[in-house]
Amino acid sequence: QVQLVESGGGLVQAGGSLRLSCAASGNTASIIVMGWHRQAPGKQRELVAIVTVAQRTTYADSVKGRFTVSRDNAKNAVYLQMNSLKPEDTAVYYCSAIVRGNSYWGQGTQVTVSS
């Protein structure tokens, strides 16, 4: 089992920045991939960015060049630096972890970008 706790969401104006943090606990030694997904009202949950234990990253096209995902394996933490935020980035952001093919999710943190 893995537990994930996010922090850092909030309200920001378009063009602004936010940094999300996620701390993992439990069976953290088995975590292969950590990352972030988001879900906007009326839409399906979508991948934002993920990072492997080897620090390889994958980004959604919509956030490339604006968001940066990073991981601190020693702290069992993953971060999402979000710059040049747009109103369409408004969503609940979920931290995720994959352990032996199973997905774990945090409780989510709201990010709201005003125009």
Image (cartoon, helix red, strand yellow):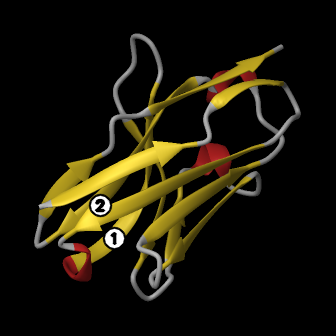
What kind of residue is marked 1? Val
Residue with the most extreme bottom position: 54
Q: Position of residue 31 (x, y in %)?
A: 26, 74
Left or right of 108 on screen, residue 99:
left
- Residue at screen point 28% across, 77% down: 32
Q: Secondary structure at mark 1?
A: strand
Q: Determine the CA span between mark 2 and mark 1.
A: 6 Å
Q: Which residue is mark 2?
A: 97
Q: Residues within 10 Å of mark 2 (few under 14, many from 20)?
A: many
Q: Secondary structure at mark 2?
A: strand
Examine the image and state in which quarter residue 76 appears: bottom left
Q: Nearer the viewer, residue 31 or 38?
A: 31
- Residue at screen point 26% across, 74% down: 28
- Residue at screen point 55% across, 53% down: 21
Q: Nearer the viewer, residue 23 or 105?
A: 23
What kind of residue is marked 2? Ala
Left or right of 86 on screen, residue 55:
left
Q: Are marks 2 and 1 in contact (CB under 8 Å)?
A: yes
Quadrant placement of the N terminus: bottom left
Q: Residues within 10 Å of mark 1 (few under 14, many from 20)?
A: many
Establish if 13 lies above or below 101: above
Q: Which mark is residue 43?
A: none
Establish if 83 lies above or below 38: below
Q: Which residue is mark 1?
A: 33
Left or right of 52 on screen, residue 67:
right
Q: Position of residue 22 (x, y in %)?
A: 47, 55
Examine the image and state in which quarter residue 37 appears: top left
Count the labels in the image. Answer: 2
Q: Nearer the viewer, residue 14 or 26?
A: 26
- Residue at screen point 17% across, 69% down: 99
Quadrant placement of the C terminus: top right
